Image (tube, helix red, strand yellow):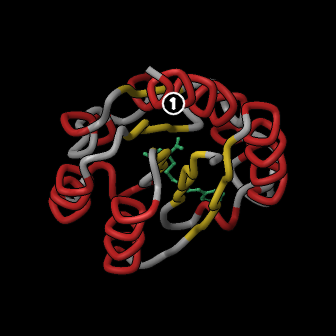
Amino acid sequence: MASTIFVLNGPNLNRLGSREPEHYGRTTLADIERLCRETGEDLGLDVEFRQTNFEGLMVDWIQEAGDVAQGLIINPAAYTHTSVAIHDAIRAAEIPAVEIHLSNVFARESFRHHSFVSPVAHGVICGFGATGYRLAIEALSDVIRT
Ligand code: CA2
């Protein structure tokens, strides 16, 4: 049976492609979803792709991923830097998680240098724009298989 991975996206990422192209490029979230589906198909993975602007809903989805999926890719967006709830949910889900950011957060403001998610992530990818999602799926696929 094919493995399922959740790809979860946090607040404001629904605006991708429309504003701040210097940080996030011109790619839309729909483009990224297509890229994730194509990559998942190539690797035999079922991809569940979602975005929310609500922290509690993100927690619900991480819990759901822990129940039904074999891996998680998450761009928590601003919640990266604030959310103990998301840290706790990922830890409790007990599936491998990849934290991803479009921009290189370490080349930006210092408040973006701390992540509550990194300590509970299997790995972190940042700074490669939409390509990072493809890299994250490939890496997670290897982790799930081994
Ligand atoms: O680089 C990333 O992927 C971030 O997770 C994006 C977050 C930011 O808070 C993190 O520090 C790094 C912000 C997402 C906001 O996305 C927008 C896209 C277009 C227009 C406005 C916001």
Q: Position of residue 91 (x, y in %)?
A: 19, 49
Nearest the eye: 63 or 18? 63
For the point 71% across and 57% down, which residue is it? 16
Q: Quadrant of residue 137?
A: top right
* Mark 1 vs ligand 1: CB below 8 Å: no
Nearest the eye: 133 or 25? 133
Q: Is residue 127 above or below residue 82?
A: above
Q: Is residue 123 above or below residue 92?
A: above
The amino acid sitting under disc 1 is: Leu
Q: Quadrant of residue 133?
A: top right
Q: How many marks?
A: 1
What is the residue that sits farthest to the front in this orientation? 1
Q: Position of residue 86 (x, y in %)?
A: 26, 60
For the point 78% across and 48% down, which residue is it? 37
Nearest the eye: 140 or 82? 140
Q: Is residue 80 left or right of residue 40?
A: left
Q: Position of residue 94 (x, y in %)?
A: 24, 48
Q: Position of residue 50 (x, y in %)?
A: 60, 66
Q: Is residue 68 left or right of residue 132?
A: left
Few, some or many C-alpha atoms within 10 Å of disc 1 (few <14, some 14-19, many ≥20)?
many
Residue on which disc 1 sits: 140
Q: Is residue 99 above or below residue 15?
A: above
Quadrant the C terminus occupies: top left
For the point 84% across and 51% down, which residue is it? 34
Q: Is residue 13 above or below residue 106?
A: below
Element carrying mark 1: helix
For the point 27% across and 35% down, which residue is it? 118
Q: Is residue 125 left or right of residue 36?
A: left
